């Protein structure tokens, strides 16, 4: 009786252990991989495969999650790197680097300290690239410099299973002596530009003044020419009258000049009394006779 009971208890215990083993086997057969992670599986200490995010199946008891790897984009602490430009100026660059893991198995098994390796690699690349450029080119062609650094860094880190998403020189710092020398150079350049501008202004003023004097001379010459043309025309009229009327025309011109002179005299300032010579009356009579007056 007791033997049968012990047998039943033993069988129940076996079934319980089998059920527990089955449950644990099923439990270990599935794994949930978070969206921002990838799991690297190993079988008997050797790489097996990589699980993407989601509910995944794995071989129970033999496959284990050896390395859960985050695939989120990572930012290294800002790197400060000394470098010498092509024109022998010592500068300190502040560099930002962002990367993400796209092949976790290579990141796990090919490099021990990924952050340190990226920092060391970018230090060498930055020194090399800045050594090819003058200081002015480093300041003005920052986009080209960043693109070159990123391209070379991507090639160097490809075997590590990462993708460099951003590598940028944020700032370029100079030592005090270099900064002071650059300020002196900038001030000298500003003074030179001011002197050139002032000289160009003075040159333009001289040109405008010369143009004004030339214009005035041209107008004066034109006025004199017109006056000369008028005098010549008057002379031609007188000559024609002389040719036509002979002595009478000459006498008329003389009398006319006497009348004009007396007219100017009488119109002068301060004139109160004008004494006319007796010949003036004769002049008027002669003029009348010249034209056949009665």
Image: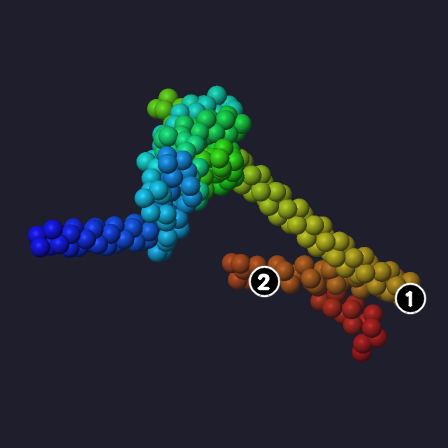
Residue 5, horizontal then vertical, whole percent: 11, 54
Q: Work out whether residue 141 can be spotted.
A: no
> Which residue is painted at 83% across and 63% down in the image?
237
Q: Is residue 266 left or right of residue 69?
A: right
Residue 186: image location, x then y, percent: 44, 31
Residue sitting at x 37%, y 49%: 58
Whether residue 261 sits left or right of residue 239 in the image: it is left
Q: Of all residues shown, which one is farthest toward the left?
A: 2
Which corner quadrant holds the C terminus? bottom right
Tell me, for residue 267, which label it has, or none: 2
Residue 70 % position (x, y): 34, 45
Quadrant (top left, top right, bottom left, bottom right) of the N terminus: bottom left
**Left/right of residue 154 with respect to residue 75 in the rendered view:** right
Residue 254 in the image, given as x and y percentages of width and height: 78, 59
Element marked by disc 1: helix
Q: Which residue is mark 1?
A: 244
């Amino acid at each position: 009786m007791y033997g049968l009971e012990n047998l039943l208890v033993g069988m129940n215990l076996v079934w319980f252990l089998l059920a527990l083993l089955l449950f644990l086997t099923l439990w270990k057969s599935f794994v949930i991989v978070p969206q921002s992670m990838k799991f690297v599986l190993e079988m008997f200490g050797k790489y097996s495969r990589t699980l993407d995010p989601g509910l995944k199946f794995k071989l129970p008891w033999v496959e284990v999650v050896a390395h859960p790897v985050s695939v989120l984009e990572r930012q290294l602490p800002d790197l400060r790197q000394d470098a010498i430009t092509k024109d022998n100026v010592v500068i300190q660059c502040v560099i930002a680097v962002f990367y993400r893991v796209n092949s976790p198995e290579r990141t796990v098994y090919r490099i021990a300290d990924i952050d340190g390796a990226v920092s060391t690699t970018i230090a060498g690349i930055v020194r090399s690239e800045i050594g090819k450029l003058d200081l002015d080119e480093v300041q003005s062609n920052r986009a080209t410099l960043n693109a070159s650094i990123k391209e070379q860094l991507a090639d160097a880190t490809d075997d590590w299973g990462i993708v460099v998403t951003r590598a940028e020189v944020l700032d370029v710092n100079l030592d005090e002596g270099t900064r002071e020398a650059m300020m002196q150079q900038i001030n000298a350049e500003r003074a030179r530009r001011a002197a050139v501008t002032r000289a160009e202004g003075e040159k333009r003023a001289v040109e405008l003044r010369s143009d004004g004097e030339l214009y005035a001379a041209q107008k004066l010459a034109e006025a004199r020419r017109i006056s000369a043309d008028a005098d010549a025309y008057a002379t031609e009229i007188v000559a024609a009258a002389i040719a036509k009327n002979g002595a009478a025309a000459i006498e008329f011109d003389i009398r006319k000049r006497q009348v004009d002179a007396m007219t100017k005299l009488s119109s002068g300032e301060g004139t109160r009394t004008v004494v006319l010579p007796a010949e003036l009356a004769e002049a008027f009579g002669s003029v009348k006779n010249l034209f056949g007056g009665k």
